[in-house]
Image (cartoon, rainbow, N blue to C red):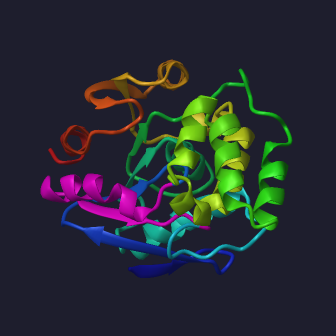
């Protein structure tokens, strides 16, 4: 992987595949660049240069403790700059909290050609997690209890059923996620700070395509549909192939290609 240097000096690891218009993929909670590989390959096969990266505190990227959503926006801007694409010519495809980050970054100075927002979990102030969730997650991380932090995030941040999370723990499925525990703190901080999109986010001034599956979590349906209503120029695309918060690589690549390659 190559490395971009964020504004605060944090190294951000990234890699690319394919040739054509640049699209930077921003993953969601508890994901790394490797998780976006199938989508990157599909984009690459469709004539797009797909760039994946490890958000800070994940994979091969670094982490300056005390990070804020603005730091993550600067990370994305650094990756965009490192691609070598002319200013304002790279597009961004964000999934889940990565979609929130993509829109936030574009509203705070990251210059992009277009945004593709896949099932952003905006709550619009409804049913928010506890105010102290990020602090409690940080304490668990500091105590070396990464699996507990991941489980708490899944229960309270994502609101997965308790029996599902306990089953995952019993099956040792949380163990490989423990190294990503610090990133759950940053995800909670991001989605809390912009639970309701700001006026700047709603008027970013670039083409915005909002994607969601037909079969996905109700919160995500409500969020995508409301965001589309509140962004006058946004296009909502329902993707039947994407099921339960998993973007289908080929279908998503087709939608992106149709809007970037004429």
Does the magenta portion include 48? yes
Q: Is residue 93 above or below residue 35?
A: above
Residue 162, x across and y down, in percent: 63, 31
Which residue is at a point 22% across and 53% down the rendered structure image? 43
Is 213 drawn above or below residue 24 in the view shown? above
The image position of residue 249, as x and y in percent, is 25, 45
Q: What residue appears at the point 19 percent right and 59 percent down from the top-left corner?
A: 44
Q: Is residue 196 visible?
A: yes
Quarter of the view holding residue 142: bottom right
| Residue situated in front as seen by the camera: 160 or 91 | 160
Question: Residue furthest toward the front?
Answer: 170
- Residue at 48 percent across and 57 percent down: it is 111
The mark tally for this picture is 0
Q: Nearer the viewer, residue 96 or 166?
A: 166
Q: Quadrant of the N terminus?
A: bottom left
Q: Is residue 119 left or right of residue 109?
A: left
**Residue 17 placement, left or right of 56:** left
> 157 or 168, which is in the foreground?
168
Residue 117 position, x and y percent, is 43, 39
**168 falls in the magenta region:** no
Side of 252 where 60 appears, left or right? right
Residue drawn at the location 56% of the way across and 42% of the way down:
100
Quarter containing the C terminus: top left
Q: Nearer the viewer, residue 203 or 218?
A: 218
- Residue 70, compared with residue 231, is above or below; it is below
**Percent x, y of residue 211:** 37, 31
Q: Which residues are magenta?
A: 31-57
Residue 138: quadrant of the picture: bottom right
The image quarter in which residue 157 lies: top right
């Amino acid at each position: 992987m190559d490395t971009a240097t964020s504004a605060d000096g944090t190294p951000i690891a990234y890699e690319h595949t394919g040739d054509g218009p640049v699209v930077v993929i921003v993953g969601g909670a508890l994901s790394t660049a490797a998780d976006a590989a199938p989508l990157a390959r599909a984009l690459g096969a469709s004539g797009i240069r797909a760039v994946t990266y490890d958000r800070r505190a994940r994979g091969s990227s670094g982490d300056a403790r005390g990070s804020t959503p603005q730091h993550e926006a600067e990370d994305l801007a650094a990756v965009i700059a490192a691609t070598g694409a002319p200013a304002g010519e790279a597009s961004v495809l964000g999934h889940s909290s990565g979609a929130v980050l993509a829109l936030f970054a574009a509203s705070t100075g990251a210059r992009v050609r277009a945004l593709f927002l896949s099932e952003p979990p905006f709550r619009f102030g409804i049913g928010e997690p506890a105010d102290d969730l990020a602090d409690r997650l940080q304490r668990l991380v500091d105590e070396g209890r990464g699996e507990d932090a991941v489980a708490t995030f899944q229960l309270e941040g994502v609101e997965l059923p308790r029996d599902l999370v306990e089953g995952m723990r019993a099956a040792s499925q949380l163990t490989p996620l423990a190294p990503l525990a610090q990133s759950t703190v940053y995800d909670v901080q991001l989605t809390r700070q912009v639970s309701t999109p700001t006026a700047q986010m709603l008027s970013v001034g670039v083409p915005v395509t909002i994607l969601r599956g037909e079969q996905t979590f109700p919160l995500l349906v409500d969020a995508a549909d409301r965001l589309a209503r509140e962004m006058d120029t946004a296009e909502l695309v329902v993707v039947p192939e994407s099921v339960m918060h998993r973007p289908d690589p080929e279908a998503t690549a087709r939608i992106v290609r149709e809007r970037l390659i004429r």
